[in-house]
Image: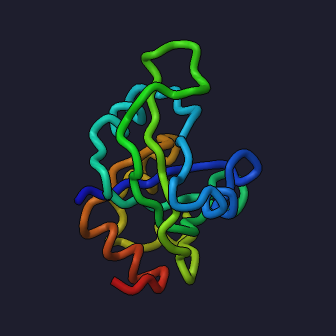
Amino acid sequence: MAYWLFKSEPDSWSWEQQKAAGADGAEWTGVRNYQARNNMRAMKLGDRGFFYHSNEGKEIVGIVEVAKLAHPDSTADNPTWECVDLRAVADVPKPVTLAGAKANPKLAGMALTSNSRLSVQPVTDDEWAEICRMGGVKA
């Protein structure tokens, strides 16, 4: 299993909306960055990801799972743009802030702390474990 981080502005698509999408989940639409799109193309069913509120909050608030592999983004005019479908798995009991991640030397190389503009990012196994520890997520 691979791990990822998905960034969303909560006024556009919030963690509460993601949870409300239910077991089928929802398309992760609107990504218009080639690196982020390519990350979605690399995903497998069941891969897990952190749901991160950007701009407002700037914190990891939930865990999602890839429910449908990369396919054309229904909001795009160009078939080059693809998305995956995500379903909510669990809340992060103690949301992990960007400031908290940046202050943790174990996360110094994490894309969130070094390439904060990328909307869909890979997360290493060690980064995943550390964020889960910080957020009170039980394995």
Residue reaching furthest top? 78
Q: On the rendered structure, is 7 left or right of 131?
A: right
Residue reaching furthest right? 11
Q: Position of residue 66 (x, y in %)?
A: 39, 52
Q: What number of labels is visible? A: 0
Q: Is residue 117 above or below residue 6?
A: above
Q: Name the image quarter holding the C terminus.
A: bottom left
Q: Quadrant of residue 70?
A: top left
What residue sits 46% from the left and 23% below the top?
81
Foreground residue, 43 or 69? 69
What residue sits 61% from the left and 26% below the top?
75
What residue sits 47% from the left and 28% below the top?
33
What residue sits 32% from the left and 35% below the top?
41
Q: Name the image quarter holding the N terminus.
A: bottom left
Q: Is residue 126 above or below residue 15?
A: below
Foreground residue, 16 or 131? 16
Q: Position of residue 94 (x, y in %)?
A: 57, 82
Q: On the rendered structure, is 109 left or right of 10?
A: left
Q: Position of residue 126 (x, y in %)?
A: 25, 69
Foreground residue, 122 or 75? 75
Q: On the rendered structure, is 60 left or right of 10?
A: left
Q: Position of residue 10 (x, y in %)?
A: 71, 54
Q: How is the image coloured?
A: rainbow
Foreground residue, 69 or 112? 69
Q: Is residue 48 above or below residue 132?
A: above
